[in-house]
Amino acid sequence: MGRPKLYHTADDVLHAKRSYSQTYYAKNRKSISEKNKQRYRTEKRLKGAGKAGSLSVTSSGSVPQNQRRTRKHGQDGAVKDLERTLMIVVQQSLTRFLDHSIHNIIWSPSLCDAIKQLQVALQKVEEVRSTVGSLHASVLQANGVGSELQVVEVTSCRVTNIIHALEEVIIHGVADLENLMNTYSRGKLLYQCTPDIIPIM
């Protein structure tokens, strides 16, 4: 014979969960407070890094683990983190970032270094794309279609547009520098013909 049910209604279960949560918080208030303070400081530091337009990069060219947020805070927090990472990579505006990069490619004495910077940015955005793909699948699995999925799809579309724009500039820069200069001066590059990708408010 199994053990008897402790809670017979959904209200009983909800009341028991709340009671347990309050007891746990009372016992662990100090450590919870410290974790929240640490999370706040980390977010504040990341926002400051995003405004400065600088992202620390490891020797492998990826974002360090301490600058990545976990999905512990839900899909909404994960999407915001991915958007924040995108804006750090493109320095808050794709148009300004690529304008600056093209000027570097055209006027830099070392074409390879200027192209390498774009390739590093492309690699970071592709890392974001893989994370967005897995997040899209988990949101679809957990919630089905709805507003959460639409938010993820908007970010996915933005990532794809950034990748296409970066790849186009890299290909033009490597293949034919004169063609890049002509296309840029006529305003016919992909990023020049589409709306700028800036932070979502």
Image (cartoon, rainbow, N blue to C red):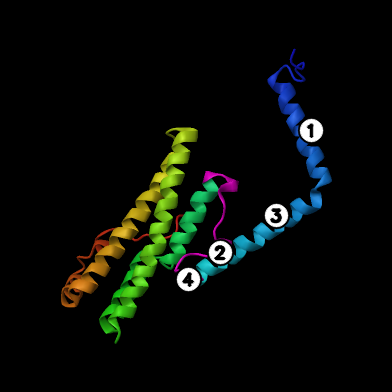
Type of amino acid under label 1: Ser
Q: If you read the primary sequence from the N terminus, does the residue marked by circle 1 or circle 2 appear first? A: 1
Return the residue found at the far bottom.
109
Type of amino acid under label 2: Lys
Q: Kindly report the distance in space between the C-alpha atoms of the residues bearing marks 1 and 3.
A: 21 Å
In the image, what residue occupies the spot 42% across and 34% down? 145
Q: In which image quadrant can residue 176 be found?
A: bottom left
Give percent across and percent down for residue 51.
51, 68
Image: magenta residue range: 54-75
Q: If you read the primary sequence from the N terminus, does the residue marked by circle 1 or circle 4 appear first? A: 1
Return the residue found at the far front.
1
Q: Kindly report the distance in space between the C-alpha atoms of the residues bearing marks 3 and 2.
A: 16 Å
Q: If you read the primary sequence from the N terminus, does the residue marked by circle 3 or circle 2 appear first? A: 3
> What label does residue 53 carry, if any?
4
Q: If you read the primary sequence from the N terminus, does the residue marked by circle 1 or circle 3 appear first? A: 1
User: Compared with residue 87, is residue 135 higher up or lower down, i.e. above or below?
Assistant: above
Q: Disc 1 vs disc 2: which is toward the camera?
A: 1
Label 1 crowd (10 A; few <14 / some 14-19 / many >=20): few
> What label does residue 36 carry, if any?
3
Q: Kindly report the distance in space between the C-alpha atoms of the residues bearing marks 3 and 4.
A: 26 Å
Q: If you read the primary sequence from the N terminus, does the residue marked by circle 3 or circle 4 appear first? A: 3
- Does the stretch in magenta take in 76? no
User: Compared with residue 172, is residue 79 higher up or lower down, i.e. above or below?
Assistant: above
Type of amino acid under label 3: Asn
Say which residue label 1 marks: 19
Q: Kindly report the distance in space between the C-alpha atoms of the residues bearing marks 2 and 4.
A: 10 Å
